[in-house]
């Protein structure tokens, strides 16, 4: 359970900039890239997409599902069958639900890295995170970061297309070197999303 929880929390967190960028990365070019990505993420109020997740631990097996976001503080991520997992941020709690075992775990949103993306307004100036790499690669930007006080949670890379500027993918490498890649497709931003998608209905006893 913890493996999946850390992956989802980290893939939803976003990184920090300026005072919390490694000194060798503080160039005018990198600051311009980070400003573009900050503007992109700050402009997202809602999002709906499909996602694909691949882990180096799972071999050729790829998971798919649906992702929904409504800021502030609401998110839902549901895996397609046969993976019986869902994650919901309902405005107060970040909820992990393993349907196979009827297992439910709650965390307060502000106790998770997901709070950075879910809260209203976005800024790269959050001091909790450290940007360790900024790269312009062909038609995309890649921004890598760690959580300053908890690097054991892993290293996260955000992958953003250049034209148009869109969040396309996350890559997470955990402390064991296991790499998980989550790609977004069929992306729709700033559209109406029903509020009941973010209501968690606990499993019946």
Image (cartoon, rainbow, N blue to C red):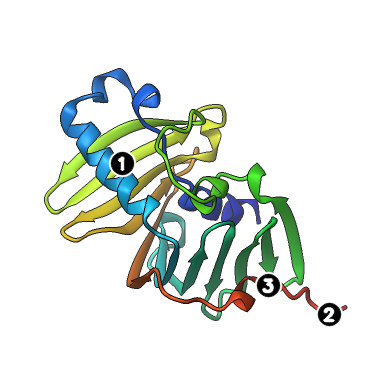
Residue 158 versus residue 15 in the image, above or below: below
N-term mark: 1 or 2: 1
Q: Position of residue 112 (x, y in %)?
A: 61, 45
- Marks 3 and 1, how far apart in space? 32 Å
x, y percent for residue 80: 51, 78
Helix, strand, or loop for circle 1?
Answer: strand
SS state under label 2: loop
The residue that appears at 29% across and 51% down in the rendered structure is 159
Q: Of the residues under marks 2 and 3, which one precedes in the sequence?
A: 3
Residue at the image position 64 percent from the left and 44 percent from the top: 110
Residue at 34 percent of width and 26 percent of height: 18
Q: Position of residue 133 (x, y in %)?
A: 29, 33
In this orientation, which residue lies closer to the viewer: 134 or 1? 134
User: Disc 2 to disc 3, how far (Cα)?
Assistant: 15 Å
State yes or no: discs 3 and 1 in contact (Cβ < 8 Å).
no
- Vertically, is 122 above or below 131? below
Q: How many marks?
A: 3
Number of the label disc, if any, that sits on residue 143 = 1
Check residue 110 in the rendering and tell me which mark sits there, or answer none.
none
Task: Please give left or right for residue 66 compared with residue 189 in the image.
Answer: right
Query: On the rendered image, what quadrant is the C terminus found in?
Result: bottom right
In this figure, which residue is indicated by the disc labeled 3? Answer: 199
In this rendering, the label closer to the viewer, 2 or 3: 3
- Residue positioned 60% across, 75% down in the render: 195
Between the C-alphas of marks 1 and 2, the distance is 42 Å
Quarter-of-image position of residue 23: top left
Q: Which residue is mark 2?
A: 204
Q: Residues within 10 Å of mark 3 (few under 14, many from 20)?
A: some
Q: Which label lies toward us, 3 or 1?
A: 3
Bin the neighbour count of mark 2 within 10 Å (Cα to Cα): few under 14, some 14-19, many 20 and up: few
């Amino acid at each position: 359970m913890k493996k999946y929880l850390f992956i989802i929390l980290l893939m939803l967190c976003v990184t920090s900039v300026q005072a919390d960028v490694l000194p060798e990365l503080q160039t005018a070019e990198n600051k311009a890239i980070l400003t573009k990505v900050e503007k992109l993420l700050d402009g997202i109020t809602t999002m709906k997409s499909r996602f694909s997740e691949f882990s180096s631990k799972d071999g050729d097996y790829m998971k798919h599902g649906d992702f929904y976001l409504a800021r502030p503080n609401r998110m839902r991520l549901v895996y397609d069958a046969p993976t019986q997992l869902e994650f919901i941020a309902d405005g107060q709690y970040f909820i992990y639900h393993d349907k196979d075992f009827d297992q439910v775990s709650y965390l307060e949103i502000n106790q998770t890295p997901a709070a950075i993306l879910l809260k209203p307004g976005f800024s790269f100036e959050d001091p909790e995170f450290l940007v360790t790499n900024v790269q312009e690669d062909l038609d995309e930007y890649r921004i890598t970061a760690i959580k300053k006080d908890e690097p054991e949670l892993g290293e996260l890379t955000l992958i953003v297309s250049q034209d148009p500027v869109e969040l396309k993918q996350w890559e997470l490498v955990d402390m064991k070197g296991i790499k998980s890649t989550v790609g977004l497709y069929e992306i729709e931003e700033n559209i109406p999303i029903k509020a009941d998608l973010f209501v968690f209905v606990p499993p019946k006893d």
